[in-house]
Image (spheres, coloured by chain):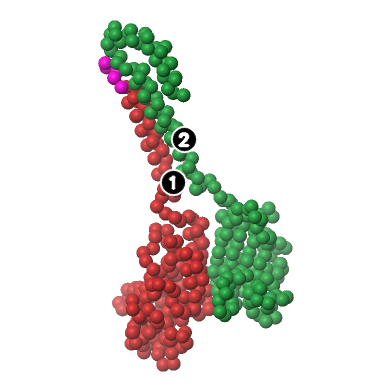
Amino acid sequence: MEAPAGRDARNQEGVPGDTASSATGKRAQTTLDFAVGISIFLLLVGFVFVFAPGFLDPFTTGPVEETVAVNRVADELTLDLLGGPAEGYVLEDDCTAAFFDDRSPGHCRFSGATLNERVGLAPRHNVNVTVSGNVTEPPSGNRILCWDDGADELFEVGSGSCGSAVTLAAGPNPVDEAETVTAHRTVALDGTDVTLEVEMW
Amino acid sequence: MTRGQAHTMEGIVAGLLLLSAMVFALQMTAVTPLTASTSSQHIENQQQAAAEGVLATAGETGALRRAVLYWNDTDGAFHGAENLSYYTNGPPPNEFGEILDRTFERRGVAYNVYVTFLGVGDDYRDRRMVYQGVPSDNAVQASYTVTLADDASIYDDDETKNATLTVSNATSFYAQDTGADSSLFNVVRVEVIAWRI
C-alpha cells in the first residue's frame, strides 16, 4: 500500500521538486526520505496493534464470575456450612450427609430447598459438589464416597457397601462442552482426610 | 541540504514513542505472559486452602501430633530421615505423610514442612521436617499449633506410643522444656509452604 503511494507522490511532486532542488540545491532527497520515514512509522503502528491485545489475553479469557464464586462456595462449605466457624476444614458427619441427601435440618448451618439455595448461588449457575477419598486398605485411589448413617461409616462408591447410604455428590454432571472451574479442599470427615471438590460452569 | 533525512528521523522518533508507550503500559499489569511465573491467583488460592486443610485435618485426626513426636531418640532425627535429619525424597512414613502425599504429591505440588518451637532464651528456632527445595515467589504458607505437655510420649516408627520415652526424658528431642515449673513442655508450630513446580 505504502510503496505505490510513495511512488505516486514522487511522480506528482517530483518534477517541480527536482526543478526546485536543481534551482536552489536545498531539498536533497525529500520524497525518498518521506517514504522511508512513513514506512517505519506505519510498520511500528502495525506491530503495536498486532501485539498489544495479546498482552491482555490472560485477563480477558475464562469464566471470571465462576472462578470467584467457586472459591467462595468451597470456602463457605468447608469453613462454615458443613462444619462450623470454630473448627475450619473439619466437617460434621450428620450435617454433611443431610446436605448431600437434599435436606436442610434445623441444627445444621445451611438452609434452603435446593443445592443452589444452600450455597447461595443464583438458579442460573450450575454447580456440582462431591466428596471423594480413600477409605479402603490397601489404597485404591480417590473415589466418591457415601455415608452410611446406620453404621456411622464412610464407604467408597463401587465397593458394594453403599446400598441405601447417601452418596456424597450433589448437583448435575457438567455437560461436555462447558468450560468448568474447579476448587479443591482437603477436609476431615469421620476421622479421615477427604477431598471436597466444587465444580461450576 | 538543510533538510537531509528529517522525515526518516521523525518516523523513527514517532516509532520509539509508540514502543515506549506500550512498554510503559505493560509495566502497569502485574502478571503478563512474559512474567517469569507459572502461577495464577486461582491456583494460589487452591494451594493456600489445601495447605490449611491438610494441617487442620491432620490436627483433627491426631496425625499432626504423632508426626511432631515421630522421633528416633537414638539417632536424633525423625524416623526414616536419619541421614539428613529431615525428609527430602517423599513424605514422612506416617499418616501425616499420607495426607501430604494425597493432597500435594499427586498433584505435582512441592512443599516444605517446618517445625517452629521456642528455644532456649526466648528465641524461636525452626527445624525442617520435609525439605524439597527453595520455594518459588508464588509459594503459599499455612501453619497450625500443637501443644506438648511434659508427659507427651515419643512415637515409635510404627506410629505407636513408646512405653517409656517421653519428651521430657528423651535425650535428643529437638525442642526444650520451656516451662520448667509447669506441666507445659513446649508449643510447636507446624508450617507448610507449598508451591507449584
**Label 2 environment density (alpha carbons within 10 Å; few <14, some 14–19, many ≥20):** few
- Which label sits on residue A49? 2
| Magenta-colored span | B1-5
Residue beneath label 1, please? Answer: B29
**Can you see residue B183?**
no
Letter of the chain shown red in the rendering = B
Q: Is residue A10 left or right of residue A67?
A: left
Identify the amino acid type marked 2.
Phe
In the rendered view of the protein, which quadrant contains the C terminus of chain A?
Answer: bottom right
- Few, some or many residues within 10 Å of mark 1 (<14, 14–19, 20+): few
Q: Is residue B8 magenta?
A: no
Q: Tell me which residue sits at (45%, 39%) in the image.
A: A51
Amino acid at pointer 1: Thr
Above or below residue B166? Residue A108 is above
| Residue A29 % position (x, y) | 32, 17
- Spatial distance from mark 1 to mark 2, Cα to Cα? 18 Å
Q: Which chain is green?
A: A
